[in-house]
Amino acid sequence: MKGNILVTGGAGYIGSHTCKALKQAGYEPITYDNMVYGHEWAVKWGPLIKGDILDGEKLDQVFKQYEPLAVLHFAAFAYVGESVSDPEKYYRNNVAGTLSLLSAMRRARCKNIVFSSTCATYGVPTELPLREDHPQKPINPYGWTKLMMEQTLRDFDHAYGIRHACLRYFNAAGADPDCEIGEEHDPETHLIPLVIQATQGLRGHVEIYGTDYDTPDGTCIRDYIHVTDLAVAHIQALEYLQDKDESLIVNLGTGNGQTVRQVIRAVEKVSGKVTPVKEGPRRPGDPPGLYAYADKAYKLLGWKPQYGDIETIVGTAWNWHEKKR
Ligand code: UDP
């Protein structure tokens, strides 16, 4: 065993897939999760400690007991709409919570953190594909919390030598190819689960938010990246921090965009069914296109998506949703 890794938010969607990848890579994932959105069934590859990142004493106990080599920090609230209506909840949990975690890391002399950032820190793109040096101008409080955490990490690196890998995810999607875990949000707001549920007959239809965008078929383009590919990137980032002792900021996307209609077609193809669809108005705050310049992660980490095409991504998600029906 290579050592313990503290995984905040390890009971969530991306966190739990990363715990599996950690175990496969020879680490022991120690999940620390307040279970507000996490699932007990998703914690299968190491212990679960129920606790909040705002609870410094509890964090101290955990650092003392497990002496983790590093922290993978997934714990955050991530509903964009809710961040607009209740920003206090987001600044408290995401920003103050991260500060509390970093303070505990300082007390424990833990020097490496891999952080879940997002393409939402870029705001509305002025240039595509989005490169890591694109200006960061978030358009909602959720994006601001992530940008503030990035800045905090930069300052903590400079002042205290805590090294970070900021991984800016594009649209996380799909499920564990072995179907052991997958995506489950309540409420569900993401496109792929909603399309699948409509196709399974569990929802009346899926609504397309806007069909008049300046894109090939009028619907929004996003860069869907398989959750297992994201998980693997975390291990590579962790080992980069351990080997190089320098911080890192990279996009994690495939570099290829898919329209909403292409996603729906992919679900229809893998399921062999017809998806009930309604065309609706644009959702406020949605840029027409978001996709990554994805080469930096490859150059620095050797990371390359293994489940790159949309049918494979959607296929793993479909299998998971069928299993849990
Ligand atoms: N979308 C849609 N109908 C839905 C949910 C999402 O048309 O019921 C579109 C949304 O406008 C965006 C894309 O699907 O262009 C991905 O949305 P999602 O909420 O999954 O992720 P986001 O890109 O907002 O992080």
Image (cartoon, helix red, strand yellow):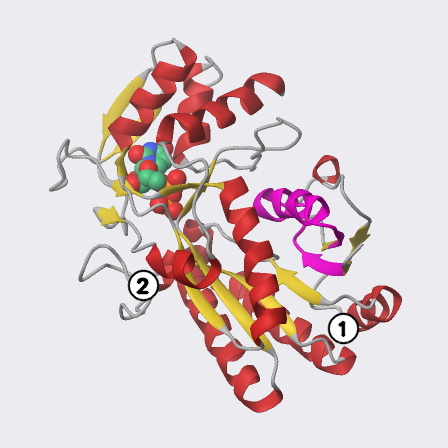
Q: Nearer the viewer, residue 58 or 223?
A: 223
Residue 286 falls within the magenta-colored stretch:
no
Please name which of the two marks, 1 or 2, marks the residue nearer to the observer. 2
| N-terminal label among 1 and 2 | 1
Q: What residue is shown at x 34% (from left), y 57% (from top)?
A: 295
Q: In which quarter of the image is residue 183?
A: top right
Find disc 2 in the rendering and name its residue: 122
Q: Which element carries disc 2, helix, strand or loop?
A: loop
The residue singled out by tag 1 in the image is 56
Q: Give the range drawn in magenta.
A: 4-31
Give the quadrant of the N terminus.
Answer: bottom right
Badge 1 residue CB within 8 Å of ligand 1: no
The picture quadrant for ligand 1 comes to: top left
What element does badge 1 sit on?
Answer: helix
Left or right relative to 208: residue 150: right
Q: How far across and how far down the image is residue 234, in percent? A: 56, 55
Q: How crowded is mark 2: few (under 14 residues within 10 Å), some or many (20 or more)?
A: many
